[in-house]
Structures are given as C-alpha cells and as structure tokens.
Image (spheres, rainbow, N blue to C red):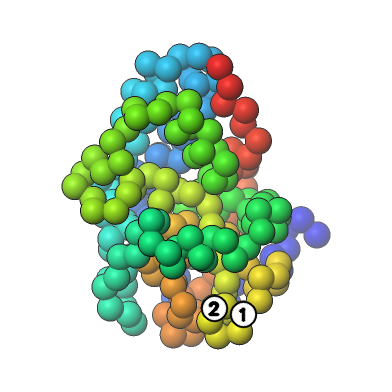
Amino acid sequence: MEDSWDVTPAAGAPPRIDPPDALFTGARHLTRIADLIEAADIDGARAALYAMPIEEAHRYWMNASTMPNHGPRDIGPETGSVREKVGNVAPRLRAAVGNRDRWHCRYCGLPVADAAFFSKVWAQLPAVFPRAPVSVANGWPIDRVFKMTADHVLPAAAGGRSTMTNLVTACGACNYQWKGDLTLDELGGALRGPVDPGWDGLVGRPLLL
Ligand SMILES: [Zn+2]
C-alpha cells in the first residue's frame, strides 16, 4: 500500500530536531531553479540559486553533529567515508527508497532532491557558485544538505543490509552528521513520515536548455 512504510516510525520516541523554516523554503527554490533552467533563463536561475538559504543550510549541517549522544564531527562530502556510504546503495534501490518516502528525510522531515538533479544543475550552471561561499572548509551546504541519501537504519557497520526494509531517505545533515554509524536507540531518534506528500524530489527533471 502506498501509504505504508517498510520501516515503521517508532511511537513515542523523540524525533530529530525540526529543520528551520528557511530550509523548507529552500526546497521550493530548488523547483524554481529547475523551472528557470528549463526555460533557458540562466540569469534567473543564478539569482534563484543565490537566494537559497546557504547560511541556514550550513548551520543545520554543523548543528547536526552536536546533537545529544555523540560528539562533534564534520565528515564532508569529499571524504572517503561519505563516498563509501553513498556507494553502498545502488542508484535504482536508492530511487525506490526515495519514492517510497516521498523524498523526505525520515529523520528530520526535510524535502530532499535526487542526486541527479544536482548533477544536472551544476552541469548547466558551471562555476556559478563558489564551492565554499560561507567559509565552509569542505563543500557547498546546499547540495550536501538537500541531496537525497539512503541511510541504513541499522548501520551497515552493525550488520544492517542494503534492503528496502533497512533503508530510509535521509538528508545529508541527518545521514552524515547526525546518524552516522549509530543506531536510533543510541541517538534517541525516531522515524517520521513526509511533511508534504506532493514533493517529488525533482526526479527526472530534464534541466535542458
Ligand atoms: Zn534530515
């Protein structure tokens, strides 16, 4: 059934923190960027890109690592550990997880977008955006927060498998900075459903001029 989750939200457990409203607005900006690129309005797309809540995304990324139950960490997208985690889940399986979860982070509820969407945006707007616009040491906050990842609820390091029943959609902040290789019991977290079931993760957007 479409409304059921393979990984059931735990009742009564405290959730991951709520993302700031600016990040929900930011997700809508992603749609606008796609629309503008597809309409060949590159100047408009560039302006929409700069209007993204970059500072808030960076703060959200950094704060995720200071939640209770684990110490600070900042494993950027260019580190081997992140690439390894992403590579653990085949693209088709990752897409199936995203579709099931309506492209919302199951830990914080943030809408996320397909990784292919970001690849296409950067291909169409090369060098439009510096990689570290807010003095971030390792990468650009927008794609590392909003890019969909598939997280192992039972961590792979603890024997969790790459299956639909053990994978959930996660934003980058929750997956890499908050959840990491810990279990929900260790973190005191719980799974959530989608905030806006109409969000499609911008899957299959052509982004062609
Ligand atoms: Zn999240």
Towards the viewer: 112 or 17 = 112
Q: Quick one: SS at disc 2?
A: loop
In the image, what residue occupies the spot 57% across and 45% down? 114
- Vertical relation: 16 (above or below) 35: below
Tell me what residue is drawn at x 56 percent, y 17 percent.
209
User: Which residue position is annotated with label 1?
Assistant: 160
Q: Image check: 88 left or right of 55? A: right
Q: Is residue 188 above or below residue 119?
A: below
- The residue under label 2 is which amino acid type? Pro
The quarter of the image holding the N terminus is bottom right
Q: Is residue 41 visible?
A: yes
Mark 1 touching mark 2, by CB under 8 A?
yes
Query: Which image quadrant for residue 50?
Result: top left
SS for dot 1? loop
Rounded to the nearest angstrom, the CA distance separating label 1 from label 2 is: 5 Å
Residue 204 image offset from top left, x and y in percent: 65, 35
Tell me the residue that label 2 is attached to: 155
As drawn, which residue projects farthest toward the right? 1
From the top left corner, tell me how far across and down residue 48 is, in percent.
Answer: 37, 26
Residue projecting furthest to the left:
135
Asked whether 33 or 8 is in front, the reply is: 33
Badge 2 local density, few (<14 within 10 Å), some, or many (20+)?
Answer: some
Q: Nearer the viewer, residue 14 or 145?
A: 145
Q: Is residue 115 left or right of residue 54?
A: right
Q: Position of residue 22 (x, y in %)?
A: 34, 44
Q: Which mark is first along the chain, 2 or 1?
A: 2
The amino acid type found where label 1 is placed reads Gly
